[in-house]
C-alpha cells in the first residue's frame, strides 16, 4: 500500500506523467481522432469512462487473482473486462447518439486496444494503490487524456487554415506537434515523481 | 468452405510488411511501443523481436483455427490468444534478463494491445493458410523491428552518444538529452516520416518528367 496523497496522484497523472505525452500510451486515438474538436471531446470522454469502469473492475479482479494465487492470468482477465466495458459504451452510444457513433467510427471498438486503458490497469496494480487511490488515478489519467487530445485537436484545426509544404501534410506534422506538446508538458516534471 | 482462398505464396507475401506496407512508417500502427521503448537501440531490438514472436505465434494459431472460430466472438478470441502468447514472452524475458525486463517495463505486457497484431490477425491470418500467414507475419515483424531500430539508433546516437552501449564520440560529446526524453520520440519519428515523404515525392517527380518530355 502506498501512502501518496490523492491530490498528488491526480496531478501526477494529469500533468507530470501525462499518459499520452509523457508515457506514450493511447497514441492511436491521439493521432487518429484529433482532427476535429467536436469528435475529440466525445472520444476523450468515452475513453475516460472506460478507464473508470476498467480501473474499478481491475482492482476487484486483482483481489480475486491474488487470493487464488493465479496472477499469471492477470493480463487475460484484464483485457476481457476492458473489452466488455468498451462493448457497453458502444451500445450506449449507438442507442442514444447514433450520429456521434458514426463519426467516431472504427476508433470506438479500438478503445479496447487503447494501451492507455490496459496500461492504467497494470500501473495501478504495480503501484499497489488501494481502491480510492485507483479511482483517483483513473480520473487523473482520463483527464490527462482529454487534455492532450483537445490541445492536439485545437492545434490541428488551426493548422488546416495555414499553407504548408506538401511533404509535411499528414502524419509527420501531427507527430512534430506531439513532440512540441510533449516538450511543453516536461515543464510540469517538477510537480510529480 | 464458402470463400476460395488465394493460396499462392509470392515474394510480395513476405516483402509487403518490409517496405511497401511497413506497419510503422506507412500504416502508423502500434505507435505506443514504437515511441516509448526506442530510447536505446538494444531496447528497440528486444521489443521488435518480442513483438515479432507474438505476431508469428498468434498468426499461426489463428490461421489454424480460422474455420472453428465463430464470427461473432472472433475479436475476443484473437485477444485471448494474443494475451496468452504475450504472457509467455513476459515470463521468458523476465527469466532471461531482469535488466531488460525493467527497462521495457509495462510495455511487454502492453504488446497485447498493439493494434498491429490484432490488425494482422483480423485482416490476414484469419483469411489465409497457416504457411502464408506465417510468411506474412515474419515480413511484418521484421518490418516492425526495422522501424524500431531506425528510431532507436538515431535516438541513442544523438541522445547518449553511443550505439548498442558502445561509446562513439568520446567524452567531449555533449548529448542531446531531449532525444531520449518523450519529446524526442515524437520528433525523430516525425523526421523519419518527412524523409520518406520527401523521397516518395522525388521519385514521383522523376517518373513524371521523362513522360512529359516525350509528349
Image (tube, coloured by chain):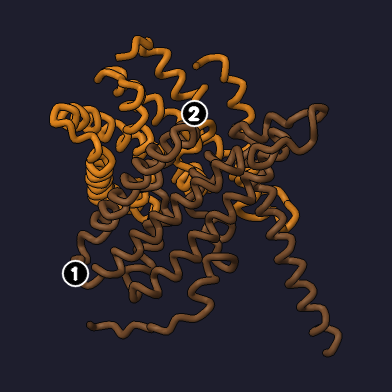
Chain colours: A orange, B brown
Residue B208 vertical position relative to residue B48 in the rendered view, above or below: below
Depth check, front residue: B177 or A142: B177
Task: Give the number of callouts.
Answer: 2
Residue B151 vertical position relative to residue A146 in the rendered view, above or below: below
Q: Pinpoint residue B3: horizontal percent, then vertical percent.
A: 28, 82
Q: Quadrant of residue B201?
A: bottom right
Task: Report crowding for label 1: few under 14, some 14 to 19, many 20 or more residues within 10 A (C-alpha).
Answer: few
Residue B212 vertical position relative to residue A135 in the rendered view, above or below: below
Whether residue A100 is visible here, answered yes or no, is no
At horizontal 36% and vertical 13% (from top left) the residue drawn is A6
At horizontal 32% and vertical 34% (from top left) the residue drawn is A51
* Quadrant of the frame with the N terminus of chain A: top left
Q: Secondary structure at mark 1?
A: loop
Give residue A18's mark: 2
Contact (CB < 8 A) between labels 2 and 1?
A: no
Q: From the viewer's perspective, is A7 left or right of A182?
A: left
Q: From the viewer's perspective, is B64 left or right of A117?
A: left
Q: Same chain for marks 2 and 1?
A: no
Disc 1 target residue: B68
Q: Pinpoint residue A43: horizontal percent, then vertical percent.
A: 40, 42
Depth check, front residue: B33 or B93: B93
Amino acid at each position: 500500500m502506498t501512502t501518496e496523497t490523492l491530490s498528488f496522484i491526480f496531478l501526477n497523472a494529469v500533468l507530470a506523467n501525462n499518459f499520452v505525452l509523457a508515457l506514450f500510451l493511447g497514441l492511436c486515438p491521439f493521432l487518429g481522432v484529433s482532427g476535429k474538436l467536436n469528435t475529440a471531446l466525445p472520444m476523450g470522454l468515452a475513453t475516460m469512462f472506460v478507464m473508470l469502469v476498467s480501473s474499478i473492475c481491475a482492482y476487484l479482479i486483482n483481489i480475486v487473482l491474488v487470493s487464488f494465487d493465479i496472477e499469471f492470468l492477470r493480463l487475460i482477465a484484464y483485457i476481457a473486462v476492458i473489452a466488455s466495458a468498451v462493448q457497453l459504451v458502444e451500445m450506449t452510444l449507438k442507442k442514444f447518439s447514433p450520429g456521434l457513433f458514426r463519426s467516431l467510427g472504427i476508433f470506438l471498438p479500438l478503445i479496447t486496444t487503447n494501451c492507455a486503458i490496459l496500461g492504467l490497469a497494470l500501473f495501478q496494480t504495480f503501484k499497489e494503490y488501494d481502491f480510492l487511490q485507483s479511482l483517483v488515478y483513473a480520473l487523473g489519467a482520463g483527464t490527462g487524456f482529454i487534455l492532450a487530445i483537445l490541445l492536439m485537436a485545437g492545434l490541428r484545426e488551426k493548422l488546416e487554415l495555414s499553407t504548408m509544404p506538401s511533404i509535411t501534410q499528414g502524419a509527420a506534422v501531427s507527430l512534430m506537434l506531439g513532440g512540441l506538446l510533449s516538450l511543453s508538458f516536461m515543464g510540469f516534471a517538477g510537480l510529480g515523481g | 468452405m464458402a470463400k476460395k482462398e488465394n493460396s499462392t505464396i509470392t515474394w510480395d507475401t513476405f516483402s509487403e510488411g518490409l517496405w511497401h506496407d511497413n506497419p510503422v512508417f506507412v500504416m502508423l500502427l502500434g505507435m505506443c511501443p514504437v515511441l516509448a521503448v526506442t530510447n536505446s537501440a538494444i531496447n528497440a531490438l528486444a521489443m521488435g523481436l518480442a513483438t515479432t514472436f507474438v505476431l508469428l505465434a498468434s498468426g499461426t494459431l489463428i490461421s489454424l483455427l480460422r474455420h472453428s472460430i465463430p464470427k461473432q466472438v472472433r475479436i475476443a478470441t484473437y485477444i485471448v490468444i494474443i494475451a496468452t502468447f504475450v504472457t509467455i514472452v513476459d515470463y521468458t524475458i523476465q527469466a532471461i534478463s531482469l535488466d531488460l525486463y525493467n527497462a521495457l517495463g509495462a510495455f511487454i505486457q502492453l504488446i497485447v494491445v498493439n493494434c498491429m497484431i490484432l490488425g494482422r490477425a483480423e485482416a490476414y491470418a484469419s483469411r489465409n493458410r497457416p504457411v502464408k500467414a506465417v510468411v506474412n507475419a515474419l515480413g511484418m515483424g521484421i518490418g516492425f523491428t526495422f522501424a524500431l531500430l531506425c528510431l532507436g539508433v538515431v535516438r541513442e546516437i544523438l541522445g547518449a552518444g553511443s550505439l548498442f552501449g558502445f561509446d562513439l564520440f568520446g567524452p567531449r560529446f555533449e548529448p542531446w538529452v531531449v532525444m531520449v526524453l518523450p519529446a524526442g520520440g515524437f520528433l525523430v519519428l516525425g523526421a523519419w516520416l518527412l524523409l520518406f515523404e520527401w523521397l516518395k515525392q522525388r521519385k514521383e517527380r522523376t517518373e513524371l518528367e521523362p513522360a512529359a518530355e516525350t509528349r
